[in-house]
Image (spheres, grey):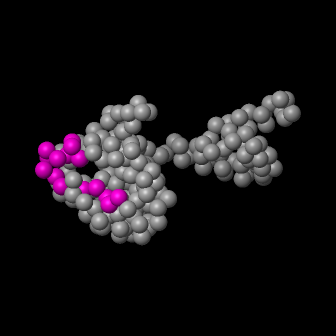
Amino acid sequence: MDYYSNRMQTLIEELSRLPGVGAKSAQRLAFHIVNMPVESVEKLAGAMTDARKSIRYCKRCCTLTDREYCPICSSPSRDQSTIMVVENPRDLAAYEKTGKYDGLYHVLHGAISPALGIGPSDIRLKELMARLASEDIKEVIIATNSSLEGETTAMYISKLIKPTGIRVSRIASGVPVGGDLEYIDEVTLLRALEGRVEL
Ligand code: ZN
């Protein structure tokens, strides 16, 4: 398979490691890249390196940020007594887009899945419990996906929080089973939030 130069082959291989990029797309991207002006390629590569190096987890809610605390956690206008628990930063973005939620978040970076060997200690649960112990939180809204993993996680968290006396609620299940929050439209998200039930 030595149709291309070694360097071209390396580029194709590296690109094909990215999620959703198959062998064909990797080739197409590689050809596109080698035909781009060098400055544009440098800009692209620079943006990737820069993002990777500067992005970290927010010290409070664990979402991705380039600062110690993310803009939501640093905003004084957010309701500091409510935390919405989501699986990943994309779900957070989906709720932010509705513009109707003004509380804080906590990003788990995954969900409990015995089948995949992902346990409670593999997601950012410890960090959530630490927050509940140190912050003045009145309600935790569990907004994990309605997949089996999301439901398992929701149940686990609610059992963990119940003894603390903090109100725990779960977003309404109008959300299609297995549906990723990020693909659901804003109206459905809002309905799920407003129709949340106490656990
Ligand atoms: Zn934050």
Residue 52 placement (x, y as % from top left): 53, 43
Residue 42 placement (x, y as % from top left): 69, 47
Q: Nearer the viewer, residue 189 or 91?
A: 189
Which residue appears at 39% of the width and 44% of the height? 148
Q: Which span is picked out in magenta?
A: 158-173
Which residue appears at 45% of the width and 50% of the height? 178
Which residue appears at 69% of the width and 42% of the height? 22
Whether residue 67 is visible to the viewer of this picture, yes or no, is: no
On screen, 171 above or below 77? Answer: above
In-image side of 185 versus 61 (left or right): right
Residue 156, quarter of the rendered image: top left
- Decide whether residue 127 is among the magenta residues: no
Q: How many marks?
A: 0
Residue 159 placement (x, y as % from top left): 21, 43
Residue 149, quarter of the rendered image: top left
Which residue appears at 41% of the width and 48% of the height? 147
In-image side of 37 versus 195 (left or right): right
Considering every residue shown, the one lying at the far right of the view is: 3
In-image side of 47 versus 186 (left or right): right
On screen, 79 above or below 64? Answer: below
- Decide whether residue 171 is among the magenta residues: yes
The quadrant in which the N terminus is found is top right
Q: Nearer the viewer, residue 101 or 182?
A: 182
In-image side of 63 versus 82 (left or right): right
Q: Nearer the viewer, residue 30 or 70?
A: 30
Residue 84 placement (x, y as % from top left): 31, 56
